[in-house]
Amino acid sequence: MSKIVLITGGSSGIGKSIGEFLNEKGFIVYGTSRNPDNYKESKFPILALDVKDVESINNTVHAIIEKEARLDILINNAGAGITGPIEEIPDVEIKNNFETNFFGPINVIKSVLPQMRKQQSGLIINVTSIAGYMGLPYRGIYSASKGALELLTEAFRMELKGFNIKMTNVAPGDFATNIAAGRYHAPLLDNSAYKKPYGDTLSLMDTHVDNGSDPNIMAEAIYKIINTKNPKGHYKVGEFMQKFSIVLKRILPDKMYEMLLMNHYKL
């Protein structure tokens, strides 16, 4: 029996690559977008869903269950980037980012759990970020939202063990996607105390994305996790140095690690 997969944010970037890969492997895949009419050429169905709208989430999840009578895998991939000096990012944009990157995945999880509990099976994969393991300069809000989802998953895993529902995090590094185009950028203000360091860091971040890895690497990693009997709580997917940066944070003194980051970003 083909497994039923729901991928939030499945219309482009990493989500699209995962969906196409799983579709080719025989899974029945449903992706989502706030504007599904823009993706009529997709190789798998794209349904309307806004992770900031609980009614939208529930309607789409219920429609899939009504059609397929089950839901085996949720991939919480929808997310939004945000950059800027924390002091200068408007509160409304900070809250909006957490609504998308943290509260959104929680509400999608809540929506699928009754069906997975009924089935006594299910797998939930939360796509986080290597940035969620450290507070990065001018990406502090993004780091915080993704880091919060990492910790939430640790708690959820223990709460769901009795129902045979598994959950894991997959933290990607920099991949060649269009995330930078959809990212909220705090404006570079002429009178800002952060104008030069923020501007330089912004250029460096965009270069990292432009030179990022092939998103199909993430798709292959997700497929491998799906076929793992008991997935770990955390996976990292990216270039060696990006993954190794997490190891360095564990073993280096705080001040030394902070100095490495500042040198990297030329601060």
Image (cartoon, rainbow, N blue to C red):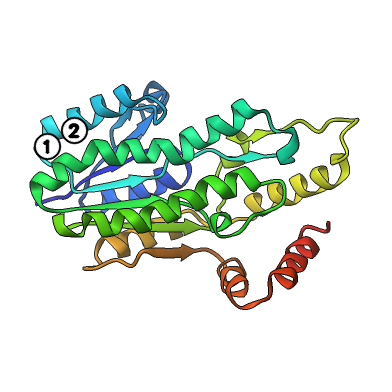
- The residue sitting at 24% across, 68% down in the picture is 230
* Labelled disc at residue 68: 1
Residue drawn where x is 58% and y is 50% of the image: 143
Residue sitting at 30 percent across and 29 percent down?
A: 57
Q: Quadrant of residue 109?
A: top left
- The dot on residue 170 is none
Image spot of residue 37 (x, y percent): 38, 21
Observer able to see residue 10: no
Q: Is residue 56 above or below residue 157?
A: above
In the displayed structure, would residue 89 be above or below residue 263?
above
Tell me the element at label 1: helix
Quadrant in which the C terminus is drawn: bottom right
**Is 150 drawn above or below residue 100 in the view shown?**
below
Q: CA distance from mark 2 to mark 1?
A: 6 Å
The x and y percentages for residue 17 are 41, 48
Q: Eyeballing the image, is 130 above or below 145?
A: below
Q: Position of residue 38 (x, y in %)?
A: 42, 24
Q: Residues within 10 Å of mark 2 (few under 14, many from 20)?
A: some
- Horizontal side of 44 relative to 78 (left or right) equals left
Asked whether the beta carbons under mark 2 and mark 1 sit within 8 Å of each other, the answer is yes
Residue receiving disc 2: 64
**Relative to the observer, which residue lies in front, 240 or 261?**
261
Residue 226: x %, y % from top left:
26, 60
